[in-house]
Image (cartoon, coloured by chain):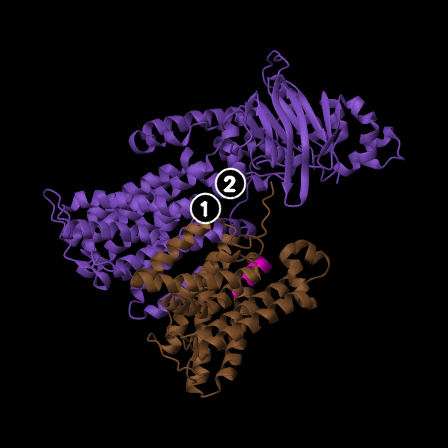
């Protein structure tokens, strides 16, 4: 930490005294580099942090630069008024370009944002008001009392201050609840929705943020160059910007800045050979994605890992992290047996495949309900319908008598449904603690106004979340793993992290999808202890499981599905003897006493 | 009416080129789930190679085309080989990797052929056909005929040959395909090679219609890609219909909005794709929890 503060101080001092070493050409280069660095931070936020492919960042930049130019030269506004309006224009365009992200992702988003960026370039090259291909010159320089911003050296300090504030704000966002939710959404948008992250609104927020950075850069650019033309905002420059972010390391804002500086300098060195510079940075992009996907920002960690393997650096010598015991929840009196979840004649068809056919069942509050059935009988599909991932073809789902059939996952999560997934959906690039922190934060997207006006409030909220997370880690015995990435943990521990994450929502209804799959005997025993304690704390649990021993000992009622229909419903003992269940599992000639054992071998795979 | 039909015919001709580009996109996408953003630049390289052998080496147009197909096919194999470590892992990274290749290809074209473009004379110097008062350029008919032939060949390859069936299997489930002994890497390489060859075909054919220059790849690629998505990404008939639709849309936008045609085309495209993200023929994607 001490080294880090010293390093930052040294860098700021360097940046502060840099102009004394530069001639008038190089100070201009430095000014342009800062503009690109701000742009790169914006692109890093939307692409690296929020995972939204955005090939329109250059259009936000262009919109603000052109906005400033048109408003000052054609409408006669002063620079700062024009700049504020131009930022507004850029933000509006950002929200418009982001709208498609609500419906599509990945390559679709890539082509749509690219198309919209081209549309904007097309407009400025043709529109009379934007000066056509010649662009607009004669933009007045911004004025500050006592500082002559015509002077490139003074302009440098203006840019430096804006840049440092922009970077600090970006880092603040990334490391507090908003950025954490964005990273969670990037790693797994389905799981993010299931823990209450408002994915659609968050995607728009990401585009909004990046357009603000684009707008900031555009305004500075207009004030610096005082001339705008279409080619500054071309697709070639968009790809250059993309290269900066990728080479620097898109998931780290610092990396994005480093990438912007490095590529700008490279371009400056090869200024007489622009084509070769293009070959160079294009190849570096390819090499980066293949060999170092985390970019320059990820290099220190990789080098440390390498040195450790060679033996030049000592390896981890601390005690081996151990999974601690589970600390049971405080017991609450069992709630009255009222239905908490009612599924009414639900059908789910995927084209021809009828995964669920007129399923009806009721789960009472305080119950542990088992759902069993052969593979492909529709158990997970039922969970997906209940948790809002699928909208059923027919039928209704009621949560404590409220119709919740068409609600989206994050709404249901906020109404008290939490779930785990059959094949583990942890946020892979977030630490275990961050995984829990995402789920612990129950604030809505609207509370993000505090990021603009009341940062201390955000900070305090984050600190209280962290305290809660520590408590939760302790309860689930995960304290030793708090800072590990989920992928580094043993499988059984990952399963426990997922349950902890679901419980972080303080749900009233917990859906567990095959929580014992892949666990060893001891882990299964611990699991049943955890589930019992969760129930004792007043949470209703519905559990899909193939491990019959666990189901029989844990559940009070069991519902059996086969081929998308409920074929039996009752106490474990009743269900195990029901002839239709035996037939569904084993065919009709088998003995009912064999059921648990045979299914157990399947679960042990 | 006359003008309307004439505009329509103009759109279909360029649309056939977009359809070829779109087919290349779709073929690669359905086989390996990858969007090749350098595809447009491969089209441009194909256009340059074909025009070089046609204009400078003075080979017949058809022979120049065949050479262009072969050489760009090799480029496709190379791109696939370099990006292979990322296959079936991180699609966003692969997508960015192909953008990197696009940047390099464009720069290489400038180094080899210079930044200024060249015009390619029409290889079919016959007077336009007149039907019901409409003028149809003979070359447009040639383009349509070649596009049709290429589509039929591709469909035959995918549905009637063993190699094609293997590629379909990889498209459906690459792990299961490996389990039954299909070499997934090789199958992907063939898809990439065929995609690049289709790009070269489009590039060679578009030479006499447009001005061949290093930055032509961007617009051709984006419109071809838009066509592929409009038709339903990954579907071959979708690529044809979507490509021609984009061509027609483009042609009418050009007629009605002149310089603003690209703006209108992309806005209309965005709106259609917002309403129906799976396109006309739909994409087979299953979202599994």
Answer whether residue A372 is visible to the viewer in this image. Answer: yes
Q: Chain of mark 2?
A: A
Name the main secondary structure of what is drawn in magenta.
helix
The numbered dot on residue A588 is none
Q: Nearest the camera: A482 or A9? A: A482
Q: Residue furthest bottom?
A: B58
Say which residue appears at 63% left-offset and 27% top-offset.
Answer: A343
Quadrant of the frame with the N terminus of chain B: bottom left
Quadrant for the C terminus of chain B in the image: top right
Disc 1 target residue? A51
Q: Residues within 10 Å of mark 1 (few under 14, many from 20)?
A: many
* Picture coordinates of residue A42, whole percent (x, y): 35, 47
Judging depth in this view, the residue of A352 and A580 nearest the camera is A352
What is the x, y in percent for residue A171? 36, 40
What's the magenta region?
B24-32
Q: Which chain is brown?
A: B
A203 versus A55 height, above or below = above
What is the letter of the purple chain?
Answer: A
Residue lying at 60% horizontally and 34% vertically, measured from the top left: A385
Magenta stretch contains residue B26: yes
What residue do we see at 48% from left, 40% from top? A185
Q: Disc 2 vs disc 1: Cβ atoms closer than 8 Å?
A: yes
Q: Compare residues B210 and A67 and report the one nearer the observer.
A: B210
State which tag comes first along the sequence, 2 or 1: 1
The residue tagged 2 is A189
**Looking at the image, residue B125 lies above or below residue B152:** below
């Amino acid at each position: 930490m001490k080294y880090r503060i010293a390093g930052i101080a040294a860098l700021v001092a360097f940046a502060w005294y840099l102009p004394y070493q530069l001639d008038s050409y190089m100070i201009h280069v430095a000014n342009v580099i800062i503009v690109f660095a701000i742009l790169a931070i914006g692109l890093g936020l939307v692409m690296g942090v929020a995972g939204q492919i955005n090939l329109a960042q250059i259009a936000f930049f262009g919109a603000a630069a052109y906005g400033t130019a048109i408003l000052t030269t054609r409408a006669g506004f002063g620079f700062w008024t024009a700049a504020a309006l131009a930022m507004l224009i850029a933000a509006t365009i950002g929200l418009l370009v982001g709208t498609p992200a609500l419906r599509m992702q990945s390559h679709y988003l890539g082509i749509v944002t690219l198309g919209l960026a081209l549309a904007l370039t097309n407009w400025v090259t043709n529109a009379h008001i934007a000066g056509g291909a010649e662009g607009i010159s004669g933009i007045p320089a911004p004025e500050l009392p006592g500082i002559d911003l015509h002077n490139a050296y003074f302009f440098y300090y203006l840019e430096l201050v804006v840049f440092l504030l922009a970077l600090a704000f970006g880092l603040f966002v990334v490391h507090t609840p908003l950025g954490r939710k964005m990273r969670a959404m990037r790693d797994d948008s389905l799981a993010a929705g299931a823990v209450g992250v408002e994915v659609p609104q968050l995607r728009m927020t990401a585009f909004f943020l990046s357009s603000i950075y684009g707008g900031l850069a555009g305004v500075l650019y207009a004030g610096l160059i005082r001339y705008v033309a279409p080619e500054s905002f071309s697709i070639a420059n968009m790809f250059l910007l993309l290269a900066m972010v990728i080479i620097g390391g898109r998931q780290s804002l610092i990396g994005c800045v480093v990438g912007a500086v490095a590529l700008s300098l490279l371009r400056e060195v090869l200024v007489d050979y622009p084509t070769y510079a293009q070959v160079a940075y294009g190849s570096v992009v390819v090499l980066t994605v293949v060999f170092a996907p985390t970019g320059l920002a990820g290099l220190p960690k990789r080098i440390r890992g390498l040195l450790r393997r060679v033996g030049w650096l000592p390896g981890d010598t601390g005690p081996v992290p151990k999974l601690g015991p589970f600390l049971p929840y405080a017991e609450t009196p069992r709630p009255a047996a009222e239905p908490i979840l009612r599924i009414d004649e639900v059908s789910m068809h995927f084209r021809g495949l009828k995964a669920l056919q007129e399923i009806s069942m009721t789960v009472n509050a305080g119950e542990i309900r088992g759902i069993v059935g052969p593979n492909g009988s529709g158990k997970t599909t039922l969970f997906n319908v209940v948790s809002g991932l699928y909208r059923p073809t027919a039928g209704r789902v009621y949560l404590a008598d409220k119709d919740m059939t068409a609600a989206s996952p994050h709404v249901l999560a906020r109404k008290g449904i939490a779930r785990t997934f059959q094949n583990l959906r942890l946020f892979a690039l977030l630490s275990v603690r961050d995984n829990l922190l995402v789920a612990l934060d129950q604030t809505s997207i609207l509370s993000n106004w505090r990021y603009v006006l009341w940062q201390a409030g955000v900070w305090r909220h984050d600190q209280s979340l962290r305290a809660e997370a520590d408590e939760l880690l302790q309860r689930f015995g995960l304290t030793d793993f708090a800072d590990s990435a989920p992928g580094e943990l043993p499988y059984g521990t990952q399963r426990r992290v997922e349950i902890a994450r679901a419980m972080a929502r303080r749900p009233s209804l917990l859906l567990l999808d095959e929580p014992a799959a892949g666990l060893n005997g001891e882990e299964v025993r611990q699991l049943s202890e955890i589930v019992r304690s969760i129930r004792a704390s007043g949470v209703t649990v519905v559990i899909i499981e193939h491990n019959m021993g666990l189901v029989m000992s844990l559940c009070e009622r069991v519902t059996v599905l086969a081929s998308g229909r409920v074929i039996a419903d009752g106490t474990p003992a009743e269900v195990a003897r029901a002839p239709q269940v035996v037939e569904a599992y084993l065919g009709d000639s088998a003995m009912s006493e064999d059921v648990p054992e045979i299914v157990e071998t399947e679960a042990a795979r | 009416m006359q003008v309307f039909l004439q505009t329509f015919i103009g759109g279909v001709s360029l649309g056939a080129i977009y359809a070829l580009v779109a087919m290349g996109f779709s073929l690669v996408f359905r086989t390996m789930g990858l969007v090749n953003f350098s595809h447009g630049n491969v089209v441009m390289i194909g256009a340059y190679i074909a025009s070089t052998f046609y204009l400078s080496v003075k080979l017949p147009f058809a022979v120049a085309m065949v050479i262009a197909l072969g050489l760009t096919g090799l480029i496709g194999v190379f791109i696939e080989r370099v990006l292979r470590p990322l296959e079936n892992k991180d699609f966003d990274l692969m997508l960015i990797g192909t953008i990197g290749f696009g940047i390099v290809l464009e720069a290489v074209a400038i180094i080899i052929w210079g930044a200024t473009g060249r015009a390619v004379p029409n290889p079919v110097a016959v007077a336009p056909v007149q039907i019901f008062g409409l003028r149809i350029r003979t070359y447009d008919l040639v383009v349509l005929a070649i596009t049709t032939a290429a589509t039929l060949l591709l469909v035959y390859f995918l549905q009637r040959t063993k190699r094609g069936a293997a590629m379909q299997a990889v498209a459906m489930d690459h792990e299961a395909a490996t389990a039954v002994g299909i070499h997934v890497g090789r199958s992907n390489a063939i898809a990439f090679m065929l995609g690049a060859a289709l790009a070269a075909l489009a590039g060679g054919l578009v030479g006499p219609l447009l001005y061949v220059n290093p930055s032509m790849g961007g617009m051709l690629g984006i419109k071809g890609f838009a066509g592929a998505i409009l038709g339903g990404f990954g579907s071959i008939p979708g690529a044809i219909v979507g490509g021609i639709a984009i061509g027609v849309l483009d042609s009418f936008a050009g007629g009605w909005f002149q310089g603003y045609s690209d703006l209108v085309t992309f806005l209309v495209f965005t709106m259609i794709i917002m309403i129906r993200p799976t396109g006309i023929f739909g994409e087979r994607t299953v979202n599994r929890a």
